[in-house]
Amino acid sequence: MVMKNCLFLPAIGAASLFTVSAVETAPSIPSGPVSYTSVSVGTDYSPEAPAPGYSSPVTQSPDTYRSSSWATLRVNLYSTNYEVRGMGVTNPLSNYGWSSFDLTLRPGGDNLFGMGLGQEVNVGLGVIYGAGDALGDAPVFNLGYGLTKELLPNLKLRAGYELLYGGLEGYLARERDKAPHRIAEDINVSLNYNDNQQGFFGGALVGLGFQGLTGLFGDLHVGYRWQDPIPSQGDLGFDVAFSVGQSYSLGYWAGGAEGFDATRLRLEFLPYSLNGSMGRDAKFQIVPWVQTSWSGNNAKKIDRADWGEAVDHFQFSIGVDLIYNF
């Protein structure tokens, strides 16, 4: 037994010596100052650098329209007719046209209550030129609030409340309720798709009036946007957007008025500047447009309830809108 242990100990000692000799010795730290060589991106130090004599093409992102951050101001400088969801008001009630501004605020980001919700506050003020006593001398005012949810990229759901004073809603609310006020209130839900680039866009709206005017109303629209249908000249170019809309109501404007309110065709011209000061990705946009509208089968029902001719049966309108994104 002693002899076996004596033979085993030299073996352990040899293994230990082999293990120690197998460990590498750490390199010595150089003495003296350390010099650095500057490296520029795109030189041969970069693995993405092209081979000598090869010029890589310049890649540009596609043209996009600006996605407004916290506020959008839309000003209708002037349009030749006053309309509500495409339903035109007759010349005796609106002789000389319409101007308005609408401000949309989006405070608090897009994750309200930690549920991915956004909120919108809408304030609008408009003037009907030559309205006389029929629509009243007071301006048209609206105030709204809504919660929004982006269900898919560029597809937004909105549920909200709106108060309207004056205009066609206020005029008919006073006629129906026989009250001195010109106020109408409603709740509404809308679903809109718009990628703000070339291609299809559209939306649907359903509302329920519960004050002044009571009943259901809605609106559908679908359109297509073309970028640069004509090559840009110099620093300026323009896009074109065409849309078709249809509004409807069920007892909203008058008792028994159930059906289509109006059908409209709209063509918008979207000028832009190549230096980015106007249109597309810029904060500022100018939108000239033309629109035709035909009243539906609700027109005569509304006229009978009003004992007059509140709705025009055909209108051709032109106008100019200004949009500024904050």
Image (cartoon, rainbow, N blue to C red):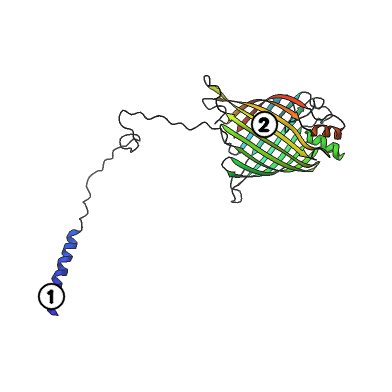
Looking at the image, can residue 109 be seen? no
Q: Which residue is mark 2?
A: 244
Q: Quadrant of residue 312?
A: top right
Task: Look at label 2 and name its amino acid.
Answer: Val
Of residues 286 and 222, the one nearer the viewer is: 222
Where residue 162 sits, quadrant-wise, is top right
In screen coordinates, is 53 left or right of 171? left
Please name whichever residue, 186 or 111, is drawn nearer the observer in this view of the structure. 186
Q: Amino acid at mark 1?
A: Cys
Outermost residue, top side: 233
- Residue at numbered disc 1: 6
Q: Position of residue 236 (x, y in %)?
A: 54, 22
Task: Give the CA separation, mark 1 to mark 2.
Answer: 103 Å
Residue shown at the point (62%, 30%) measured from the top left:
323
Q: Earlier in the sequence, mark 1 or mark 2?
A: 1
Label 2 sits on a secondary structure element that is: strand
SS assignment at label 1: helix
Kindly report which numbered mark, 1 or 2, lies closer to the viewer in this rendering: 2
User: As drawn, is 125 to the left or to the right of 310?
Assistant: left
Across and down, in percent, residue 180 comes to: 85, 38
Does residue 11 appear in this view? yes
